[in-house]
């Protein structure tokens, strides 16, 4: 059963610190993203009723500690962690805090530097055993070889997806990987092999960054969104694993593919729309096999038809249904805390028609999908509403 | 002092016994759902009913594999192979196991018959040899 919102919730402000590999202090990046979101919403921090901080690194209390940067207002502050989906879960908590009537305004803030975070693949000092969790590169490499066996997917298709996302990021000032030239399929294929069939340019960027989103009730949103389109959260869904054939209990990075299909179905039901109604999609494209499979699990095309979507250029900016319009995890970057919120940032800009050269003409509905180790899946659907009157 | 071979985690697998040539994973069987599970569970995750301890088969079929050229956790050295393989093995009971692989990429094709084997990872403080498990192609 999909979760419900008791009242309408709107995104009233978004902000980011560019994703990077420059060892910028996480507190500074969080401050920049949060301050930018507050300015975008045109409110003071004192108007925020609850804060949800998505953060992987920093140890106990680090997520809560960052609230002191913004002000000691006494509001409830909660540290959220759901691996890659941390930012998405923080956003979901903020949405439900407003949607459930707890507060009128809530803020979700994600920040991290993955070069300072332990976790998957970094169990220092342990004797390696087969029982350890696999690196994501291994897990998704296995997804890819099985797909090649079942469907006949080629390495060129994986490279085409990644090249698309590198080229999308060229026009995103917040992206970590911004090439100064068009990235070709051949260039991606020729980069260092890291986990067959994935090369280094197919793997998500590892680095730091921060992103924030502020959500509010309709009454507050109508006051704040003067003269600009209102962006409504029409679905906010999260699931964990259910048992499926071949269930891997130990060592999997994320759970069965069915988890994404189920979470998306919940989101479509809540938003009362279907995949044909989407204008853009952001997904957990840590490796291109994921984006390819999510075309199908999100219902954009039938099972086994994702390769054709790539060949047609349907998921490129200018195509029928652009995916990872800001470069995705591949090129915009993937610090765990803020990634899901960067998706909200990009989708909000697109729906407000503020995405610059990346703008999708007439974008009205966007879906954001993240998967997190453990595992969870989070899906949000945002929709533009007519311009509010000027007050 | 005599060195003894020990599993890194005796809750997950046991070493060969008697005439056995291969180690075995230690799993659970849930009578109500008919599911075999690994690692051992306290209850069936589907029906939430009781489970029984079982020893799983030591051979299965390769469901998926990859070869990594990047560092992994722990202290395993690449040696002269330039990386290491990992795979998912489907056991006859319906359990899918994720595991490092022995051999080279020429040994692995989806559907290949694979058998469980041990792999040394060091010694404990008493000088006993610690082993984990891996799977290798059955020739």
Image (cartoon, coloured by chain):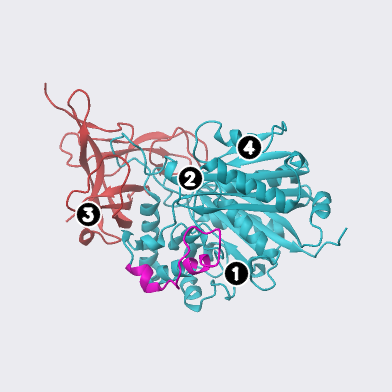
Chain colours: A cyan, B red
Residue that protrudes farthest toward the right in the picture: A391
Name the residue at the top extreme. Answer: B1
Q: Is residue B87 or residue A159 the one in the foreground?
A: A159
Q: Which residue is mark 2?
A: A113
Looking at the image, residue B130 lies above or below residue A130: above
Residue A370, labelled with which disc?
none
Residue carrying label 1: A358
Secondary structure of the residue carrying tag 3 is: loop
Which mark is nearer the camera, 3 or 4? 4
Chain of the residue on which disc 2 is drawn: A
* Residue at the spot of label 3: B82
Specify few, some or many for label 1: CA neighbours under 10 Å numbering under 14, 14-19, or 20 or more.
Answer: many
The alpha-carbon separation of the residues under discs 2 and 3 comes to 29 Å
Q: Which mark is residue A69?
A: 4
Q: What range is drawn magenta here? A: A165-190
N-terminal-most mark, 4 or 2: 4
3D distance between C-alphas at marks 3 and 4: 46 Å
The spot of residue B39 in percent (x, y) is 38, 38
């Amino acid at each position: 059963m999909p979760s419900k919102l008791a009242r309408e919730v709107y995104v009233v402000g978004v902000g980011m610190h560019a994703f990077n590999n420059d060892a910028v202090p996480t507190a500074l990046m969080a401050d920049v993203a949060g301050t930018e979101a507050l300015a975008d919403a045109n409110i003071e921090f004192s108007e925020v009723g609850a804060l949800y901080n998505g953060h992987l690194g920093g140890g106990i209390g680090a997520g809560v500690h960052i609230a002191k940067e913004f002000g000691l207002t006494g509001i409830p502050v909660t540290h959220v962690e759901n691996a890659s989906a941390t930012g998405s879960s923080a956003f979901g908590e903020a949405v439900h805090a407003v949607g459930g009537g707890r507060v009128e305004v809530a803020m979700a803030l994600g920040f991290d530097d993955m070069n300072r975070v332990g976790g998957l693949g970094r169990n220092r000092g342990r004797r390696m055993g087969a029982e350890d969790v696999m690196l994501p590169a291994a897990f998704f490499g296995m997804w890819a070889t099985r797909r090649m066996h079942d469907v006949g997917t080629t390495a060129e298709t994986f490279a085409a997806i990644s090249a698309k996302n590198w080229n999308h990021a060229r026009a995103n000032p917040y992206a970590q990987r911004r090439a100064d030239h068009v990235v070709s399929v051949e260039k991606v294929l020729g980069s260092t092999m890291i986990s067959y069939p994935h090369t280094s340019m197919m793997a998500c960027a590892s680095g730091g960054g921060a992103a924030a989103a502020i959500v509010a009730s309709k009454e507050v949103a109508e006051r704040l969104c003067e003269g600009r389109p209102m962006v409504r959260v029409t679905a906010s869904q999260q699931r964990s694993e259910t048992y499926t054939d071949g269930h891997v209990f130990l060592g999997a990075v994320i759970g069965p593919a069915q988890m994404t299909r189920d979470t998306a179905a919940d989101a479509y039901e809540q938003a009362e729309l279907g995949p044909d109604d989407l204008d853009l999609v952001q997904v957990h494209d840590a490796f291109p096999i994921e984006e390819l499979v999510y075309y199908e699990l999100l219902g954009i095309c039938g099972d086994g038809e994702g390769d054709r979507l790539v060949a047609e250029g349907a998921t490129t900016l200018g195509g029928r249904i652009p995916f990872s319009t800001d470069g995705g995890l591949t090129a915009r970057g993937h610090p765990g805390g803020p990634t899901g919120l960067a998706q909200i940032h990009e989708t909000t800009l697109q729906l407000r028609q503020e995405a610059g050269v990346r703008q999708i003409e007439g974008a009205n509905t966007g879906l954001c999908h993240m998967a997190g180790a453990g595992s969870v899946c989070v899906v949000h659907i945002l929709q533009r509403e007519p311009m509010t009157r000027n007050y | 002092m005599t060195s003894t071979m020990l599993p890194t985690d005796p809750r997950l697998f046991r070493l060969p016994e008697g005439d056995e040539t291969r180690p075995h994973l230690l799993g659970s069987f849930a009578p109500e759902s008919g599911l075999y599970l690994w690692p051992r569970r306290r209850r069936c995750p589907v029906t939430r009913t009781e489970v029984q301890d079982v020893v799983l088969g030591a051979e299965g079929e390769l469901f998926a594999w990859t070869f990594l050229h990047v560092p992994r956790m722990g202290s395993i050295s690449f040696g002269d192979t330039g990386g290491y393989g990992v795979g998912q093995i489907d056991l006859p009971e319906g359990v899918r196991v994720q595991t490092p692989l022995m051999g080279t990429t020429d040994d692995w094709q989806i559907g290949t018959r694979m058998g469980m084997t041990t792999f040394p990872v060091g010694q404990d403080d008493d000088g006993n040899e610690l082993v984990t498990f891996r799977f290798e192609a059955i020739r």
